[in-house]
């Protein structure tokens, strides 16, 4: 039922806005000027917005920061009234009639923080493209010109946009004798950054003297100490009296000799590395030189060290250094295999005739775990370029072939799982290079064919490389027409395929679906009529496809479906919001139809798998099979019988304690399994598999790539599902339980079968009655409780909850402050209590402290109390401690009270908050 949102009182409107997700909030801002202003005044803020110019498209990346929320959004703005909104699970199209590309950009920029606007020039083919984007970007904080732009385009971009940007960053180095760097250095800019670590910028004395930017940073610069010395001497003579720069930072590509730079100049050394120069007119220059005296390194026979010393040296090596060491010999490779590194994933991208490889890993140092990434470029001459923070060096290799290099990296730290996580085909030239790629990379988990590929390359890459992808193939962009239909690709024997193009839908007919051999198929967006879907279902009902292989089909459609048209002339039953078809041979098919969505989810009743006598395997083989299962398969296997349930229990797979959400009529479990790498020097858990499952009354829904699977088990109720899941993982407690928008009656049911939890969260979406009842029933068994809704008034005060015997409680509702009085503080029986926002007078706090000083609360259970007050309320410590003897401990915000029996109370007053620590 529609709600007249803007007719609500202002407090309720603001509350509704705060309940919206960020994407809903942005969509709401597009309705009118009033909704736009309401969104601008809300607590969620677009902290940064990056606009990337890519030919006729403008890509917007937004980083949003709000109350306990951080998100990143991506939009693609085309020429016209529509934009693409990129979600984690797909792409949506937003459209507003009358809006142009400029209007979309102006709208988003108006929602952003002024210093968070960044314009990124990337892959722009002509200077004319810059003219089309000059109008929608009247002002922004930073201009970033990427390294793939020509000197002419760089010059034009700086000319057009530098006057409206605070920071100008140029990542290319196109300068030579004809295109001199001084052309840019003498521009009148606030801040200029030249950033190219691969190709250092050549800088001369005259370049520094011509610099006209207030701040200049060059990374990396190529200049001699002699020229720097001459520059400083000229400045000391006062010839540059009106020199505009305030800061110049030069990061050199080599070591610098400080003594040569300052030779013949009088200076004063400050703090070891800072040098102050003062000339006759009183002006000063501060020079900071990171100086490292040239070292003469003595080679160390690393492999001759004792075993413990060698292992210690390996543990101190960086991830990149370990990788380089592994290439020296078989012995060094084996040593590196047992170092303090665990591989998270290997990702490969093919671009032209080069292979880009990225390895993501975790590395342990001194009791802490750090994420590490190394990027390689493998070239045809078998040389390797790898990316470091300071440069992009090249390893010259004379021993390995191209394929041996890839095999080496696949086996490194990863001997039991020699497979690439993801292979991306960005572009290939010539097309025959695909055969080389197939020989070099025999298998990968996922294959993605990029939208940058030509149509011919994309189709050939699918036909040649899709079979090597053991899990999923993602095909970007629709490249099919009437002559080149999609059926040829759909008839391949593959496990899972995603076809994705939001702009140009994939044309489908009933014959395409009937010839489908792919097990799991996901298409966004599909162009198929309800009549064609009806023909497909009727043919299935006739049993013409008794061995139909697909198990999951999800179509996001161009146009809305008419459910009656799709099911016309077909007998079906409605079960759990789905339509169930049953044919004469007993086979069943569940269908979900919602507007522009058609889905055949995986159902236990519809699976027709080739049986394997798994339970007849020897015990060791059976245990190995269980260990290879992901957590989804393991749970499904446990549901087959009591024996399979006991087998899964005995496998002792370890999971994090579940995170549980209770909302409306379902319970959602989020489970993450972690593993310890088989490594004596790496003592950290790594994520392995995760599972998100919703339990309804008669079924379970498993999250699956934007859709879901439906599991059913005869006579299983919601409580049976939950008890089974906890049992097979040998757990009796959950980590966190969040109560959301549920009824009182459902709360009574849930509390009967939900396990005990460590942390209880009662959401602001809960009603007052549910909030109070959930607190009273569930809080006593939880270690931590957070209440996000203020349900208290004059007839229902907070004291009865404060008097409960609990360990840690937080009341947090910034919409409505919690009214507190002296009596409320005196009855507190909670060990650790936090209240945000608290509404209490200074007088009441003063009375409370006086009573504590008198010793009337000798057995006071409270240990810590935090009260966050309204921002508008000013706190005067003298009024708080009026008539009380106290000691100031630190900087007038920490106070110590001590009473006659020796007990102490520490009080901190910081940023409108009181912190009480009781002895």
Image (cartoon, grey):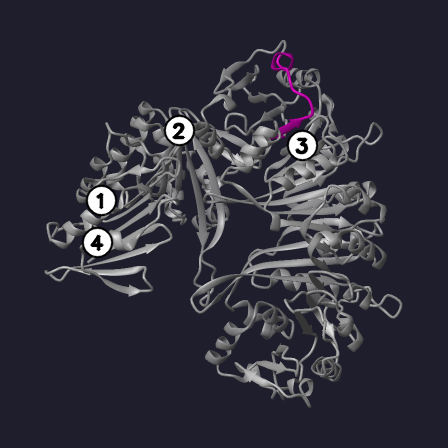
Asked whether the residues under the numbered discs 2 and 3 touch, taking CB atoms below 8 Å apart as contact, a structural biologist would say: no
Asked whether the residues under the numbered discs 4 and 2 touch, taking CB atoms below 8 Å apart as contact, a structural biologist would say: no
Alpha-carbon span between mark 2 and mark 3: 32 Å
Say if the magenta span includes residue 557.
yes
Say if the magenta span includes residue 302.
no
Sequence-first tag of 1 and 4? 1
Q: Is residue 532 above or below residue 60?
A: above
Furthest-right residue in view? 178
Name the side, left or right, on which 850 lies relative to 303.
left
Secondary structure found at label 3? strand
- Give the residue at mark 2: 741
Give the magenta range. 550-567
Sequence-first tag of 1 and 2? 2
- Residue 679 in sight: yes
Q: Is residue 600 above or below residue 739?
A: above
Q: How many marks?
A: 4
- Residue 392 in sight: no
Name the side, left or right, on which 781 lies relative to 706.
left
Q: Which of the 4 image quadrants contains residue 566?
A: top right
- The circle drawn on residue 524 is 3
The x and y percentages for residue 548 are: 63, 27
- Give the residue at mark 1: 844
């Amino acid at each position: 039922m529609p709600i007249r949102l803007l007719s609500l009182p202002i407090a309720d409107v603001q509350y509704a806005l705060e309940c919206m997700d960020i994407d809903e909030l942005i969509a709401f801002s597009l309705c009118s000027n009033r909704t736009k202003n309401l969104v601008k005044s809300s607590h969620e803020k677009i902290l940064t917005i990056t606009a990337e110019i890519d030919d006729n498209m403008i890509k917007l990346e937004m980083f949003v920061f709000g109350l306990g929320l951080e998100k990143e959004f991506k939009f693609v703005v085309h020429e016209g009234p529509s934009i693409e909104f990129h979600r984690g699970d797909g792409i949506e199209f937003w459209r507003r009639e009358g809006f142009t590309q400029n209007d979309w950009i102006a709208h988003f920029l108006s929602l952003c923080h002024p210093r968070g606007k960044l314009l990124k020039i990337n892959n722009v083919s002509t200077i004319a493209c810059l003219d089309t984007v000059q109008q929608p970007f009247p002002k922004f904080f930073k201009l970033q010109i990427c390294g793939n732009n020509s000197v002419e385009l760089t010059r034009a971009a700086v000319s057009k946009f530098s006057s409206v940007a605070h920071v100008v960053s140029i990542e290319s180095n196109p300068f030579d004798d004809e295109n001199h760097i001084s052309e840019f250095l003498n521009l009148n800019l606030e801040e200029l950054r030249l950033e190219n670590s691969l190709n250092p910028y050549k800088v001369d004395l005259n370049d520094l003297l011509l610099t006209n930017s207030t701040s200049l940073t060059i990374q990396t610069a190529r200049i001699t100490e002699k020229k720097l010395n001459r520059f400083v001497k000229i400045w000391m003579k006062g010839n540059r009296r009106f020199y505009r720069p305030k800061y110049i930072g030069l990061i050199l590509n080599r070591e610098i000799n400080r003594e040569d730079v300052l030779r013949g100049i009088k200076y004063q050394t400050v703090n070891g590395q800072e040098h102050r120069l003062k000339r006759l007119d009183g002006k000063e220059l501060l020079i900071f030189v990171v100086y490292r005296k040239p070292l003469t390194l003595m080679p160390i026979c690393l492999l001759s060290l004792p075993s413990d010393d060698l292992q210690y040296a390996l543990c101190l090596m960086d991830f990149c250094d370990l990788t380089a060491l592994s290439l020296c010999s078989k012995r060094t490779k084996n040593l590196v295999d047992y170092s303090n590194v665990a591989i998270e994933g290997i990702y490969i991208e093919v671009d032209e005739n080069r292979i880009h490889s990225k390895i993501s890993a975790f590395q342990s140092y001194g009791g802490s775990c750090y994420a590490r990434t190394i990027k390689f470029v493998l070239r045809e001459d078998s040389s390797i370029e790898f990316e470091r923070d300071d440069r992009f060096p090249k390893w010259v290799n004379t021993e390995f072939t191209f394929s041996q290099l890839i095999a080496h990296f696949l086996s490194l730290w990863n001997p039991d799982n020699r497979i690439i996580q993801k292979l991306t085909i960005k572009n290939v030239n010539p097309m025959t290079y695909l055969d080389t790629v197939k020989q070099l990379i025999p298998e990968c988990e996922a294959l993605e064919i990029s939208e940058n590929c030509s149509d011919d390359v994309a189709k050939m890459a699918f036909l040649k490389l899709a079979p090597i992808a053991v899990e999923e193939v993602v095909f970007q962009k629709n490249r099919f027409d009437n002559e080149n239909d999609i059926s040829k690709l759909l008839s391949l024997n593959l496990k899972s395929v995603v076809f994705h193009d939001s702009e140009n839908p994939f044309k489908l007919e009933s014959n395409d679906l009937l010839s489908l051999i792919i097990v799991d198929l996901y298409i966004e967006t599909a162009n198929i009529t309800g009549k064609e879907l009806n023909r497909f279902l009727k043919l299935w009902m006739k049993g013409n496809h008794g061995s139909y292989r697909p198990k999951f089909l999800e179509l996001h459609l161009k146009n809305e479906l008419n459910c009656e048209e799709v099911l016309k002339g077909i007998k079906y039953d409605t079960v759990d919001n789905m339509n169930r078809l049953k044919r004469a041979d007993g086979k069943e098919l569940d269908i979900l139809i919602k507007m522009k969505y058609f889905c055949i989810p995986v159902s236990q009743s519809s699976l027709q798998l080739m049986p394997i006598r798994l339970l007849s395997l020897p015990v060791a083989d059976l245990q190995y099979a269980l260990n290879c299962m992901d957590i989804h398969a393991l749970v499904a296997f446990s549901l087959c019988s009591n024996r399979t349930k006991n087998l899964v229990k005995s496998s002792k797979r370890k999971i994090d304690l579940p995170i549980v959400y209770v909302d409306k009529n379902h319970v959602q479990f989020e489970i993450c399994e972690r593993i310890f790498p088989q490594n004596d020097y790496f003592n950290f858990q790594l994520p392995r598999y995760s599972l998100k499952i919703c339990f309804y009354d008669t079924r379970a829904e498993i999250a699956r790539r934007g859709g879901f699977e439906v599991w059913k088990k005869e006579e299983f109720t919601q409580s049976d599902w939950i008890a089974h899941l906890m049992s097979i993982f040998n757990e009796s407690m959950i980590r966190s339980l969040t109560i959301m928008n549920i009824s009182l009656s459902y709360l009574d049911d849930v509390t009967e079968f939900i396990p005990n939890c460590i942390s209880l969260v009662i959401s602001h979406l809960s009603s007052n009655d549910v909030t109070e009842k959930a607190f009273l029933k569930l809080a006593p068994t939880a270690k931590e409780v957070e209440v996000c809704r203020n349900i208290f008034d004059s007839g229902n005060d907070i004291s009865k909850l404060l008097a409960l015997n609990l360990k840690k409680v937080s009341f947090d509702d910034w919409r409505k402050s919690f009214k507190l009085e002296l009596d409320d503080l005196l009855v507190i029986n909670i060990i650790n209590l936090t209240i945000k926002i608290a509404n209490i007078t200074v007088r009441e706090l003063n009375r409370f402290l006086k009573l504590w000083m008198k010793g009337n609360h000798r057995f006071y259970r409270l240990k810590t109390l935090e009260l966050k007050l309204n921002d508008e309320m000013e706190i005067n410590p003298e009024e708080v401690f009026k008539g009380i003897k106290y000691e100031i401990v630190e900087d007038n915000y920490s106070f110590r009270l001590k009473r006659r029996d020796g007990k102490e109370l520490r009080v901190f007053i910081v940023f409108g908050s009181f912190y009480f620590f009781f002895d």
